[in-house]
Amino acid sequence: MSPTAVDDLRGRTRAFIREIVLPAEPEPGAPLDDATRDSLRAAAREAGVFAPHAPVEYGGGGIPIDQWSPIFQEAGYSPIGPAVLNIMAPYEGNMHLLHVVGTPVQHERYLAPLVRGDIRSSFAMTEPHPGAGSDPRALSTTAERVDGGWRITGQKRFISGANGAAFAIVMARTPAVEGWDEGATMFLLPLDAPGVTVGPDIHTIEGAIAGGHPYVSFDGCLVPDDDVLGEPGQGFRYAQVRLGPARLTHCMRWLGLARRAHDTALDRANARELFGSRLRDLGVAQALLADSVIDLETSDAIIDKTARMLRADPRAGEALSSVAKVHCSEAVFRVIDRAVQLCGGDGVTDALPLIQYLNEVRPFRIYDGSSETHRWAIARRAASARSRDVEAGAARLDEVTP
């Protein structure tokens, strides 16, 4: 899509969110009801802003990932905007994975209704300790080979969006059989299939993701070969196809919400008078506002760089997405927290939605890999890359001669 067309879509998305979606938002902390969501989605389709990232052949806008950020940020200006535009986690990431890895039959059965917004989906990888979490290779759910398919047994935990979802992409450990490698395999499994139990629920401080974060159990669930996503044994590789872009789209959406919090803080700083001056003219307030601008702009920059890299070199982009995820998850929290501080007592009441925003973004430092896990991976990659450079002939810079 040309830059002019992207700017046009951004402008239309901005107008739609601010003129149509913001007035329809529920009270802070309350869920978006289905009737309001469906009405807003119909309006989004009419406005031509629905599912901008999804494949054109299934009703989406077909925008490449390096052009998503301005659109996703505009949608994220409202906590319900991403759900209305059908770009919310986890189904946004599932659309991408299905499009890249799925078969034509799987596209028609799973991807097409997901893009249309007819159904929701979830991604079932995380497990109770000591199973997979920040370390996906601790995967304990198994799938055994049976005639015509696979039988899945295990338990998942914190499966975002599973309540009410039509299907899940399930990660399970599989043996080396019939020429396939031992490893992990992804399966497309309807959540009303025999042997599937959704629940109990896990109650969290945020509520933007429809369907919660429940346990999901699989008791000998049969999955036919046609519902294997990609090649058996390659699940860990496919996970990176999904997780790198999914981390980045979280950054985009929450950065949009941080911009709204910052606008709220600016409005308060411009209007509030104390100690004989407007708040905006006091040094302590100026420092908070300036630091938020810095966080917003640096987040925007790392998102753009990572998105371009994910399109040009997905493996390098996946690595850089860890940097973007750590930076943005911490930066958006700081921006919203400063907005709360600048709004004083009002900031911690439901008269303003800022505390809701803080609750929404706080889990982001844990979801999709904790900041600590990503920092560990970032440091390992950096040290390994430098070691390879030195082995290839680069001079060591730390050597001290007597």
Image (cartoon, rainbow, N blue to C red):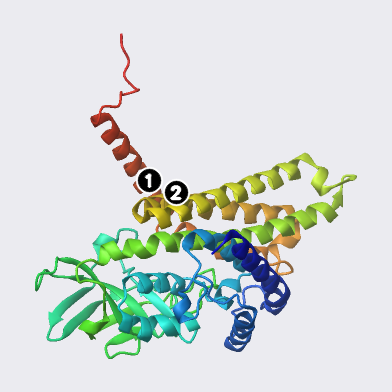
Q: Which residue is mark 1?
A: 378
Residue reaching furthest to the top: 402
Whether residue 128 is visible here, answered yes or no, is yes
The quadrant holding residue 119 is bottom left
> For the residue labelled by badge 2, is the local secondary structure a helix, a strand or a loop?
helix
Q: Residue at x 47, y 80 (%)?
A: 115
The label shown at residue 213 is none
The quadrant holding residue 33 is bottom right
Inter-mark Cα distance, 1 to 2: 7 Å
Q: Name which of mark 1 and mark 2 comes first in the sequence.
A: 2
At label 1, which amino acid type do we have?
Answer: Ile
Is residue 333 left or right of 217 when viewed as pictured? Answer: right
Whether residue 367 is visible here, answered yes or no, is no
Is residue 217 left or right of 147 when viewed as pictured? Answer: right
* Location of residue 269 in the rendering, given as x and y in whole percent from the top left corner: 79, 52
Depth check: 245 or 200 in front?
245
Residue 257 against residue 294 in the figure, above or below: below
At label 2, which amino acid type do we have?
Answer: Val
Depth check: 246 or 340 in front?
246
* Location of residue 208 in the rendering, given as x and y in whole percent from the top left corner: 55, 72
Q: Which residue is mark 2?
A: 323
> For the residue labelled by badge 1, is the local secondary structure a helix, a strand or a loop?
helix
Q: Residue at x 38, y 55 (%)?
A: 318
**Residues at circles 1 and 2 in contact by the CB criterion of under 8 Å:** yes
The quadrant holding residue 336 is bottom right
* Location of residue 322 in the rendering, given as x and y in whole percent from the top left corner: 42, 52
Residue 220 against residue 98 in the figure, above or below: below
What quarter of the picture does the N terminus occupy?
bottom right
Residue reaching furthest to the left: 178
Q: Residue at x 35, y 23 (%)?
A: 397
The 10 Å Cα crowd at callout 2, few under 14, some 14 to 19, many 20 or more, is many
